[in-house]
Amino acid sequence: MATTLAVDIGGTKIAAGLVDPDGRLLFQTRQPTPRTHDPDQVWAVTLRTIDDALAAAGGAVDGVGIAAPGPIDLPTQSMSPINMPAWRGFPIRDRVMSAVPDVPVRMAGDGLCMALGEHWRGAGQGAAFLLGMVVSTGIGGGLILDGAPYHGRTGNAGHVGHVVVDIDGPPCTCGGRGCVEAIASGPHLAQWARSQGWDGADAKELADAAASGNEVALAAFRRGARAVAAMIASVGAVCDLDLVVLGGGVAKAGPVLFDPLHEELRTFAGLGFLSGLRVVPAALGGEAGLVGAAALLRG
């Protein structure tokens, strides 16, 4: 049975896997992303994961799908991820094609691949108008519109982390200000909590503190949930969504995020056609990007 080689590239890890025609992840391998400004060192690690997956497949795959952190540039099939300074205009598809010749190679943003994975095999099955989003070190997303992935002009549609939710808000790494990522991503949740007297280290500790009833931690998650809810209401109105699937490290906080998020969404989503908009936890976890990258070969 033919399998698809999937590659999921991120700022902290680079993964490769084998996905069967039913969307089942049969094999995966991962390596830490090198902290370097040398593009060839990052490519060497990427190639190692690809070679490991090819070996597990016996050298034969029917194609390669790539989940790439943004921004990407579909016309040139290159990527310049904010959190990977070694790669600027990096020709990722050409490099992968040289490593795995004679099969089709497709790429898309990692947020879109997450949405595709959840739509195919996860919590988004059956939804025609879906936003898949990750709330973690950053905030990213991808859109399924009328049952099909929506790439946009350059491949960056669904970059919801940079929806502005506070016009007087803090600066963002994108160069703008007031973006939801600058308020609700894991590092910014923890940063705000520390400014209010909390003495923990990161978003995981903050989630544990909130679950234990710490008032500052609970306030941090409510503040972040309010920003995410405002973004979801805005994107929902523009795209006429019926479902949002939310994953990532911060989403693992569970009720301390989702309870205030659902409450705040009722405040912002006032239009009648948004009354049925649902927000649910992702089902595939870290596998969604690989499954979604393989889904790029289905169409």
Image: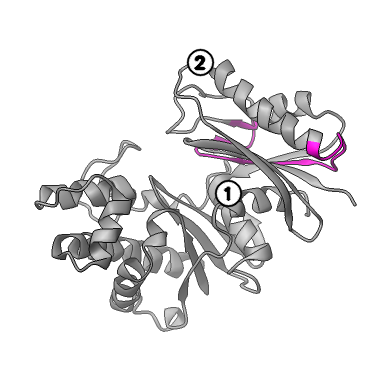
SS under mark 1 = loop
* Residue type, numbered disc 1: Gly
- Residue 134, above or below 31: below
Magenta stretch contains residue 61: yes
The magenta span reads 56-78
Is residue 113 shown left or right of residue 93?
left
Residue highlighted by disc 1: 152
Which image quarter: residue 229?
A: bottom left
SS under mark 2 = loop
Residue highlighted by disc 2: 38
Residue at (71, 32) in percent of width and height: 50
Which residue occupies the extreme right position in the image?
1
Q: x, y percentage for residue 168?
A: 17, 50
Color scheme of the displayed model: one colour
Number of marks in the rendered image:
2
Residue at (23, 55) in percent of width and height: 166
Mark closer to the chain start, 1 or 2: 2
* Residue type, numbered disc 2: Asp
Q: Could you tell me if the residues under marks 1 and 2 are in contact, i.e. CB atoms within 8 Å?
A: no
Q: x, y percentage for residue 114?
A: 57, 54
State the mark number for residue 204: none
